[in-house]
Image (cartoon, grey):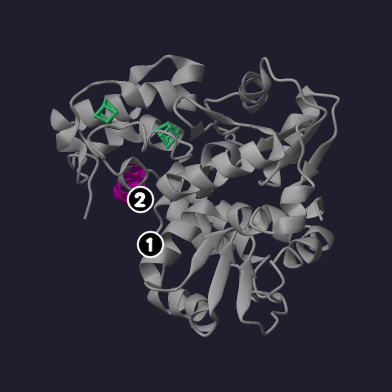
Amino acid sequence: MATPHTHAATPGHEACSGCSLCLLACPVWRATRDIRLTPHGRAKAIQNGVAVLELAESIDACTLCGACEPACPENIPLVDAVQQLRKQLAGLSPERDALLKTLLDQHVVVNHRQGSASETLLVPDRALAEHPAMTERALKLSAGRPMGMAGDIGADIALMLESGTPVPGERLQRFLDPLQKVGRLVVGDGLLLRALRTWLPGKPIDGFGFAATSVANVRRSLGQDDFYVIESRAFHSDWERLVLHYDALRVESGCAMNLDLQRLAIPTTAGSLPALTGKNRVDVHDQARWILEGREFSRIVVEDFNDIAIFNAVTDKPVVHLAELR
Ligand code: SF4
Ligand code: SF4
């Protein structure tokens, strides 16, 4: 059991060379210029035996956007590392534990809607699931194959993964049982997507953005006046494959995208744990302005429902969700 004096420990940090390439992609570094809040800073602190509680501010500042992972030449699993460190923080701060418990209680309520039987199931993220009309539209983006809706979207499990809260075995089994029975899953939450690939090996599992932009009608409805915003977490869970997919979409449609710095998907960080707890070190509106800087466009298309409000606040151009394209 971790104590306030337990040394932080995660596999991979010993391999950090201190090259600082992760800083190029990290929105927290861009916003703060504080190296203690970056993968580089955490790795060096861990190599020098720092206690996990001393790293709490840095660990909780991470938005888990995943943008640093493809930048790291040592291939350190930096998202998994932060999730592991958050697990080590559990129980060390009553204030932090109480905040996470309140958030978790809120996330349970959107589970257990009426599910539907289908060969392909959509497991939307919480933000999309809270807008039933948009979820209905999303269900139709299925490349000719009928797509049903998961009855249990695992919003509480997604937050447990993000916050480092252990997922109770019985709860996990109840979530996975109906998913095991279907042929294919389309998953909205990027962290849940990563975990489901581990929990259900061999099951075809795609992110919502990839699945929707594989539909011919959706591809045809994108044009050179569009700026398309990829959801960073799902992209970075499988970036070597997805960069080819999105590059092909970009060439075919002529639209611009939030791909930069050797084609990393740059995030707004809206909807992350630091944003949910009011402790985001990234100003999401400043980040959104930076993403749009120097771009010419007439419309913004977002994969993440959380991004609609953020871009609406910084531009007078229309902002639509991917599910609205048909
Ligand atoms: S996951 Fe995102 S916020 Fe966290 S360290 Fe990496 S780039 Fe920075
Ligand atoms: S990119 Fe990787 S090796 Fe380089 S400083 Fe960051 S974590 Fe360390």
Q: Residue at x 15, y 36 (%)?
A: 14
Q: Is residue 166 above or below residue 261?
A: below
- Residue count near mark 1 (Cα–Cα under 10 Å), binned few <14, some 14–19, many ≥20: few
- Work out how far the residue at label 1 is from the one at label 2, CA to CA, in angstroms: 9 Å
Q: Which residue is mark 2?
A: 90
Disc 2, SS: loop
Q: Nearer the viewer, residue 154 or 183?
A: 183
Residue 91 among those drawn in magenta: yes
- Whether residue 49 appears in this view of the structure is no
Q: Residue at x 53, y 41 (%)?
A: 232
Q: Which residue is mark 1?
A: 166
Q: Nearer the viewer, residue 256 or 75?
A: 256
Q: What secondary structure is the stretch in magenta mostly built from?
A: helix
Q: Is residue 61 left or right of residue 267?
A: left
Residue 81 among those drawn in magenta: no
Magenta range: 82-92
